[in-house]
Amino acid sequence: MEKTKKASESLTIMTNIVLPNETNSLRNLFGGELLAKMDRCASISAARHCERRVVTASVNHVSFDHPIPEGGIVVLESKVSRAFSTSMEIYVDVWLDDPINQKKIHTNSGIYTFVAVDEFNRPIPIPQMTPETDQEKERFEAALRRKELSLILSGRMKATDSVELKKLFGS
Ligand SMILES: CC(C)(COP(=O)(O)OP(=O)(O)OC[C@H]1O[C@@H](n2cnc3c(N)ncnc32)[C@H](O)[C@@H]1OP(=O)(O)O)[C@@H](O)C(=O)NCCC(=O)NCCS
């Protein structure tokens, strides 16, 4: 597919308040609830990029760096970080927004892979993606390494066939 899109065209922002039924015994947002929100946000970015229906192929990395308390305002921001042939990597950043003290804390991030599919669930080609900002360029560069790692961990690629990881660790 010839079409190229900007990363910013897939930007998706979701803002929610943490309700009591979403919390764990410490009254912080339950990890699984956050994962579901991140998956939803990422899927919208993926669909915005490829203008097709998409499925989650892999959750490549998620970190939980800071708890999000009940009543907290959670802001999720996602964008496509790189498009491959039929798959794309989506980077999701999560923030705890405190409008009273005017603070915004980065609480965690996640990296997802989505695949564009046709009505028979077969992968289909997607537009390429051009990074513009320094952060978009950095994430774009590292995405191929992460794709190889994800394929190796899921048994879809032999470690010996990797190109980017070999460059990183030496062959
Ligand atoms: C995702 C899915 C469509 C891939 O189908 P497939 O027949 O295995 O297709 P392919 O092997 O051609 O892979 C398609 C693309 O996904 C990528 N991919 C597949 N698994 C991947 C993984 N674990 N990590 C990273 N990329 C992956 C492939 O590298 C390929 O990318 P490219 O075309 O951009 O190079 C299929 O496995 C599926 O439908 N899975 C279930 C999805 C789902 O239901 N998700 C919701 C879970 S609740």
Image: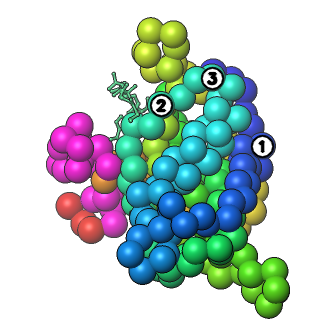
Q: Earlier in the sequence, mark 2 or mark 1?
A: 1
| Residue 141 on the magenta segment | no
| Residue 164 on the magenta segment | yes
User: Cα distance, mark 2 to mark 3?
Assistant: 10 Å
- Image quadrant of ligand 1 equals top left
Q: How is the image coloured?
A: rainbow
Is there CB contact under 8 Å for labels 2 and 3? no
Q: Is residue 119 above or below residue 146?
A: above
| Quadrant assignment for the N terminus | top right
Residue at horizontal 28 percent and vertical 59 percent from the top: 166
The residue range painted magenta reads 150-168
Residue 164 in the figure: left or right of residue 101: left
Residue furthest top in the image: 120
Q: Earlier in the sequence, mark 1 or mark 3?
A: 1
Estimate how packed mark 1 is, as few (under 14), some (14 to 19) or many (20 or more) residues with alpha carbons within 10 Å: few
Q: Which residue is mark 2?
A: 55
**Which percent across, then down, holds residue 161?**
23, 44
Q: Is residue 38 above or below residue 123?
A: below
Q: Which residue is mark 1?
A: 9
| Quadrant assignment for the C terminus | bottom left
Residue 107 in the figure: left or right of residue 171: right
Q: Amino acid at mark 1?
A: Glu
**Which percent across, then down, holds residue 89?**
52, 46
Is the CB of the residue bearing disc 2 within 8 angstroms of ligand 1? yes
Q: Amino acid at mark 3?
A: Arg
Picture disc at residue 52: 3
Residue at horizontal 49 percent and vertical 50 percent from the top: 36
Q: Is residue 88 above or below residue 91?
A: above
SS for tag 3?
A: loop
- Does residue 93 show up? no
